[in-house]
Image: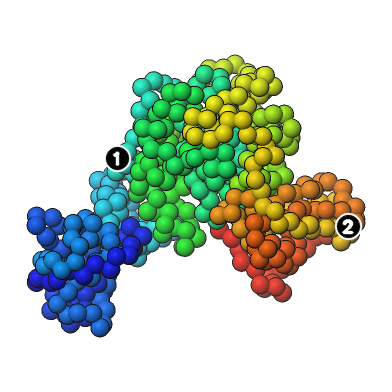
Amino acid sequence: MKLVVGVLKITAGGKRIAIIDNETASLLGVHSSDRIKLSYKGKEVIAIANVATDFPPEGVWLYSEIAEALEVKGGETVEVQLAAMPESLNYVRNKLRGERLHAPELSNIVKDVVEQHLSDIEISAFLTALKIYGLDMSETEALSRAIIETGKSLNFGKTPVLDKHSIGGIPGDKTSIVVVPIIAAAGFIIPKTSSRAITSPAGTADRVETLCPVNLTIDEIREVVRKTNGCLVWGGALELAPADDLFIRVEYPLGIDPLLLPSIMSKKKAIGATHLVVDIPTGSGAKIKSPTEAYTLASDFVHLGEHLGIKVQCALTLGDQPLGCCIGPALESQEALNTLIGKGPVDVYEKALSLAGMLLELVGEKDGRKKAEEIIRSGRAEGKLREIIAAQGGNPNVKPEEIPIGTKKAVVKATQKGRVSWINTEAIVRVARAAGTPKDKGAGIILKAKMGDAVAKDATLFEIYAERSSNLEEALELAEKLAPVVLSKKVGERMLIGQFPSKTESERSFMFER
């Protein structure tokens, strides 16, 4: 059927969607969410049909993504017909029945996800099936390779290429900003691509963006690495693993993360990594709660690395409370820079040294931690970070106190004397995001007491920073309601940390970082 094009001149978030009138849909035999094929001057695009009323019956209305693909501006006549269901949908249904999928089937699914042939409903069905039935190692490897093959890859022309990754789950983890310059100063390549925050107060890219630009092209990354051995960039615009980004878009609202292993490892393979340390925060405040769960995940990382040609070492790190004292992009950048200068908190310093030491030992150093410590104490790590900042277009002479933070400030004080027995990381995250993180780079929290610290009555527990008064008021109100820092006078004095159903409205956050 020939229909006249109308262009909506708005985007659909990358999705290929076309709108047709319900009468036209009936003539075509199309139902809402069916696929239609649009043809114009030798070009063909498959789109998901939205069936609506009160649209011109002889027209098809296109979002910007399809209009650009077909090279139409409106008013043209295009051929529209019902498209066949993609073969990959049969494989999705097989997984919904609990069947094991083979490499060609998983490759077909990933290819159709990247080419926008599957709707969000169909992708969510696939991800839900993975959550319920899981993936064995052969499926995980096949899915990882499929994600790699449908994206771009980086080749720096020499090896080894080192990388470090945290599975996330605790706020305040700014160790990448410390580890990358240590490894680069030791003479090794470490091209660190990072995410922006999805549910946390700050991702590594958000932190680094307060120091220098992070939206670099692949060619720009190569040049920065050539000059400095390392980089700290946002990976979202590089198309290294576009399928994974599309999966994440659907995983987040579902609150599930069944692709943790293939997601991380496919991106590491695409960046050219040969040696990788994976940080697995473990504890009550992290995504991974128990050592048993952590060791199982670590084993899977190592085995998948063997299949993909990456030497992997996993670090099980303490995850009972936020790392360091600062939470929020600018505050965390200050703390990372202070750590390299020698003025940072001990837990950030120790964790960064441990991870950097493990990486150095992976490539043959006998005492990696000792070498990492020497690189920091000599000032070479700080100097290397400043080289990277300059190469990425930032100010290499920036001082920690010159990184701007929010001018609006509130103080939360202790209502009793005692020791900090627990810090509710989920509540801390909610308060920080209410203050404006990660969008407002200067927003965040500074903890003035950590677990085990003695606190006097009326002493400051934490400070909240915001760029807008309205955010500060909202964050302070939430902090008073959630009381994220719990005090007791002695061990065992306070045993109740919550109840269900709660007396106050509370949302359980889904900590989703890659």
Using the image, determine if residue 368 lies above or below residue 72. above
Where does residue 276 sit, x and y in percent of width and height?
49, 31
Nearer-the-camera pick, 102 or 484: 484
Q: How many marks?
A: 2
Element marked by disc 2: loop
> Residue at 72% of width from left, 35% of height from top?
344
Q: Which mark is residue 149?
A: 1
Q: Residues within 10 Å of mark 2 (few under 14, many from 20)?
A: few
Amino acid at dot 1: Glu
Is tag 2's residue or tag 1's residue first in the polypeptide sequence?
Answer: 1
Question: What label does residue 458 carry, if any?
Answer: 2
Q: Is residue 412 left or right of residue 444?
A: right
255 displayed left or right of 55:
right
State the image coordinates of residue 148 (x, y, percent, origin top left): 33, 40
Residue 486 at x, y = what percent?
A: 79, 57
Front residue (pair 507, 6): 6
Query: Which residue is depicted at the point 83% across and 58% down?
Result: 413
> Which residue sits at x=40%, y=29%?
222
* Relative to 1, residue 84 above or below: above
Asked where in the image residue 350 lies, by quadrant, the reply is top right
**Are the residues flagged by discs 2 and 1 in contact, CB closer than 8 Å?**
no
Mark 1 is surrounded, within 10 Å at the Cα level, by few (under 14), some (14 to 19) or many (20 or more) other residues, namely some
Q: Nearer the viewer, mark 2 or mark 1?
A: 2
Q: Is residue 245 visible?
A: yes
Residue 96 in view (yes/no) = no
Quarter of the figure with the N terminus: bottom left
Q: Residue at x 54, y 26 (%)?
A: 387
User: Which structural element holds mark 1?
Assistant: helix
- Three-letter code, disc 2: Asp
Spatial CA distance of label 2 from label 1 is: 58 Å
Report the side of 300 relative to 18 (left or right): right
